[in-house]
Image (cartoon, rainbow, N blue to C red):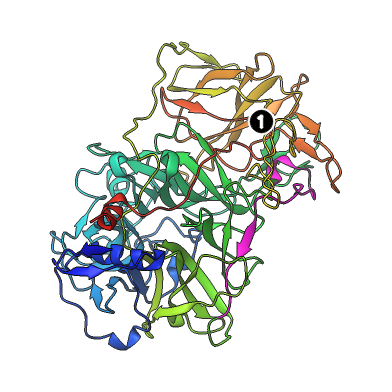
Amino acid sequence: MWIRSRSGKIVLATLTTTAAVVYLIFGFKNEMKISPSTSTKNSVNHHLNYDIVFTSRTEPASLEARAPETEPFREPVQAPWAASQGRLRLLDRYGRLYELTWGRLLPDGSSLVDVMSPSVSLDGKRILFAGRNSANARWRIYEIQSDGSGLRKLTGGLDDPGCIAIPPLRFRADGSRLSDTERMKLDYDDIDPTDLGPNGFAFASSRLPDLGRDHTRRATQIWTWALGAKSPQAVTGNRNNDRWPVLIAGDQILFSLWSRNREAVTADLSELKPVSAGGEFATHPTDNWMANVVMTNAAQFGYAIKSVEPVWRPRPLFNGRIVFMTSPKPNSPMKLAQADWGYIRTAPSSLPKGEELPYEGGAQLYFGPDRDQDGRELSAACPSPAPDHSVLFAASPTNSPSSSYGIFKVTDDWTSGSSLPELIFDDPDLVDSEPVAIYPRRFEPEPRRIEPPVVEGYTPPKTIKLVSGEEYKGPMGYLENIAMSTAIRNPIPWHDRSGGVRIDPRDNPLVSPPPNVTSVAVYSANRDRFDHPDQLRVIGSFEKTVVLPVIGKDDFSAWIPSDPLKPTVLVGQDENGNVARWKGVTSKDHPERTYFAYAGDHYSGVRQNGYHYCNGCHTGHTFTVVDPKERIGKSWNKLLSK
C-alpha cells in the first residue's frame, strides 16, 4: 500500500501492524520551530518511531507521590516536589534532542527553572506540564506546542482567583505577615495537568488549603478548568493527595488517590471517629494508594484498581490494562505493574482488623521487567503507553546515583516474563524521567462537552436538621443511590479468563451486599482552618452531621450540606443506629467474611446544587464498567487509506 507523507513523498508501507504504525507516526510528524540541542548527542541510545517528551531534573522529585512534610508558616516556602533545576525536552524519532523550556523567556520576561509531569493533548499538538518560573517558584500549569512554539502559562495569571479559602499564615524574614489576599493568590501549587478535550483540562492542586490529619502535608485534589470558565472547580475532596489525572473512555478521569482516612469504626460499632482520639476500634484506618476515577463533571466517583501494592501514576495501555509504578514492599525498589480494570485486593476501611478480601482469579496483576539487558536490577518508574504496544518508563540500576535514571521502553506484554527493556536516552548528569509519546488519542465514544449536572425538578429544603439539633441553611447538593443491595463481583472482569464463561455478579457475588442498612449517616471531615486571630492552625474536626433514611431496600436520595471545606464520608447504619455489619458468602476455599458498610477509603465532595451518584454500601464501593484501552487517533488512521 502506498501512502503520502506530509512532505509530499510517496513511500511503500507493508501490510504489517508494526510497519503501519511506523508510517502512521511518520505522517503525524510536526516540523520543529526551534533548533535541536548539540550538547547531549551521546545520550541517545536507541531511535524510536515516534517523538517523546520527558523531563530531565537535578533531583528525582518526580518519583515522589506524597507531598513532603512542611513548616508552613515561614517564607520562602519550599515548593513540593521541587528540583534545583528541571528541563522539558523532546526527543524526535531521528535522535535529535530539543530543549523546550530551558533558557527560554516567557512573555513576562521570566524563565522556567523547573518542570514536572508532562502530558500530551488529545490531538497530539500540545504539551501540558507543570513549571516553576524564576519570579514565583510555585508550581503553575503551562503549555507549549509540540513543534516547540507557543510557550505560555495556563494557571496563575492575574485573573486566576487562586485558593478558595485562606491558606496558612506566612511570615517574611523580617517578621511581617503576608496579607490574606496575597496568600490566596500565591500560596498553592498546580501540578500534573492533562487535556480533557472539549471539557478543558484537569490537574492536581492545593487550592483547598489543608494539612490533613496527623501530619503537615499539603493536601491536593483533582481540579478541572472548563473552556471559557473564570476559575477551576475541584472534582475530588481528598484531605491527603490526589495525583496524576488522565482522561480515559466514558468521560472518566483516572488518577492516583492517597487513601489515608484516619477514622475507623469503634469497637462497639456505635460511630466513626479518628483513631488519634484513642479507644478500641473494629477496623483499621486506611493508608494506601489506589487508582480511582471521577467523571469530568464530578457526578460519579469510584475505584479502578485497589491492590495491596500502592498504585502511582496509572495510565491506560494499548492492551486494555492499566500500567502504574509501585513499590511491592516498603522501601523496596520501585517496579512497574499492570492490572486488569477493576482489580481489587484490599478495602481495609470496611473489613475487620486482620482480614483480607477473598480472591478467586479473574482480574490479574502483572509485574514488569526488573532487569536491564546487562542483567542489572532496575528501579523503574513513570510508565506511559506508546503506540507500538510498548511501555515507556524511567529506570536506573538499583543503588546507583539518581542521575543514572534514563528513559527505557519495553513491550506491554508481560505475561511471559521474558521481555527486556531497551535504553532510549540517558543524560548522565540529570534524572531523566516522565516520558510520554506524542500522538493523537482516540476515544469510543468521543469525549463530549458535559456540564456539571444540576438538580432539576427537585426543590431543596429550606433547612436540614443536623444531628446536633441545629438547622442548616447553607448550600446543598443532591446525593442518590438506587443500588444499595445490588451485588458486585470481586474481582472484575465478570468472566473466567481460562474458560471464557461470563459470571453474573447478581447470581454469584463474591462480596455480598449489606442486607441490614436502614439509614445512611453523613460524617463531615472538616478541613484545617487558618483564619483564627491567635492560632496558626485550627485542626479540622470530624463529626456526624445528618442521618438519612433508606426507603425500601435500595432507594436512598437526599439533599445534604455542600461545602468544599467539609468533605464527607458515608456509613450505612442498621436499625439500632450502629454501623451496619454482615457476613459475606462462602466460596471455594475461602470462609465467609465480615464486612462493614463504611466507605472509608476516600473523602467526597458534593457540589452546590449538584447531582451526585454513588453505588452500593458494600465492600469495594462504586465501580464503573469502562473499556480503558488506549487507541491511536483517527487522524492517523486516515493516512492508511490514502
Q: Position of residue 171 (x, y in %)?
A: 35, 56
Q: Quadrant of residue 547?
A: top right
> For the point 59% across and 73% down, which residue is it?
333
Q: Which residues are magenta?
A: 348-371
Foreground residue, 548 or 488?
488
Q: Is residue 18 above or below residue 626?
A: below
Q: Is residue 576 left or right of residue 114?
A: right
Q: Quadrant of the N terminus?
A: bottom left
Rendered residue at 75%/39% (across/down): 510
Q: Is residue 365 magenta?
A: yes
Which amino acid does the dot numbered 1 rest on? Answer: Cys
Depth check: 496 or 391 in front? 496
Vertical placement of residue 141 versus 87, above or below: above
Q: In this picture, is 192 found above or below 58?
A: above
Residue at image x 32%, y 88%? 42
Q: Quadrant of residue 135?
A: bottom left
Q: Nearer the viewer, residue 233 or 547?
A: 233
